[in-house]
Amino acid sequence: MKLKKTSLEVIAPSVEEAIARGAAELGLPKEDLEVEVLDEGGKGFLGLSGRQARVRLSVAIEDGPASMAAELEPGDALQVLEDPEAATQTGAPGTDPRTVRVTQDTVQELIKRLGLEAQVRAGWGPADPEARTQPLMVDVRGEDLGILIGRRGETLSALQYITRLIVAKELQQQVAVVIDIEGYRARREQQLQRLALKIADQAVELARTMELEPMPANERRVIHMALRDHPAVRTESVGEGVSRKVTIIPKS
């Protein structure tokens, strides 16, 4: 089983303080973090205006075998439902106000620590019978939040992963938190669905397997779902780690 990592860099007057600050920000004990000292810092002339220490704190993420669960983002923490269809009837977990409140407050605090302002709203989404989960949807709105999305959503994925770690630690249970910023995920999903159909048409027309560019697991899942009922093609994920991609294969 392979490991992937999510990292956070922290600057502070000393290495020890930087580690303590980072651990507090992640909501994890120091023992669960891998520490890389990037700059030990140093005192300036006569002990004044010294250089601050800089460390990188990493959290290991298990990358499991290819499966429906593996098609979620690395490190996904999922709350499995015994009966997804009954979730809205029983209110479990969909009417748990404490989980919603803790998750919303966690995202708000993380954004505040980044020096940004935003409106955060959280609520339970519809249960997914196939994945046997019920996502807790977090919607973030504000101005100039592109920095929270990052290149191809990488920063957004990191924010979501760290939120799941903190919420799981606080509640002592795993919750499938899904964060969207200014509707980015919805727009990206529509783009991927259109791409999937376009490449599927090409695969059928050329009668050969077509490969998409490497994508994170959540985006690969969108491609798989968009084409799962397609009459003329099937899909498979191939490759390892960040090179993993979707192939679209004509049915014989």
Image: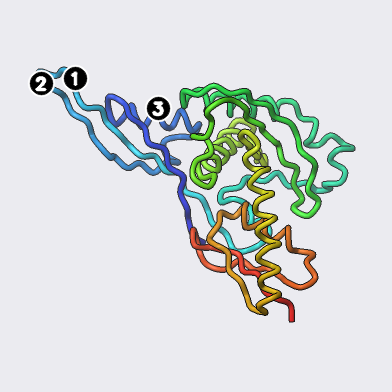
Camera-side residue of 32 and 251: 251
Q: Which residue is mark 1?
A: 49
Residue furthest bottom in the image:
252
Please tell me whether mark 3 or mark 1 is closer to you in this view. 1
| Contact? badges 2 and 1 (CB < 8 Å) | yes
Residue at the image point whose x is 18% and y is 28% from the top: 42
Could you tell me which residue is drawn at 33 percent across and 26 percent down?
Answer: 17
Q: Residue at x 41, y 36 (%)?
A: 30
Left or right: 1 with respect to 31?
right
Q: Position of residue 84 (x, y in %)?
A: 82, 46
Q: Position of residue 161 (x, y in %)?
A: 56, 41
Q: Which residue is mark 2?
A: 45
Q: Can you tell which mark lies on residue 21?
A: 3
Within the image, what quadrant is residue 156 found in?
top right
Measure the C-alpha gap from mark 2 to mark 3.
26 Å
Q: Which mark is residue 35?
A: none
* Pointer 3 local density, CA inside 10 Å: few below 14, some 14–19, many at least 20: some
Of discs 2 and 3, which sits in the foreground?
2
- Distance between the alpha carbons at the discs numbered 3 and 1: 21 Å
Q: Amino acid at mark 3?
A: Arg
Is the Cβ of the residue at disc 2 closer than 8 Å to that at disc 3? no
- Label 2: element kind: helix
The residues bearing labels 2 and 1 have C-alpha atoms spaced at a distance of 7 Å
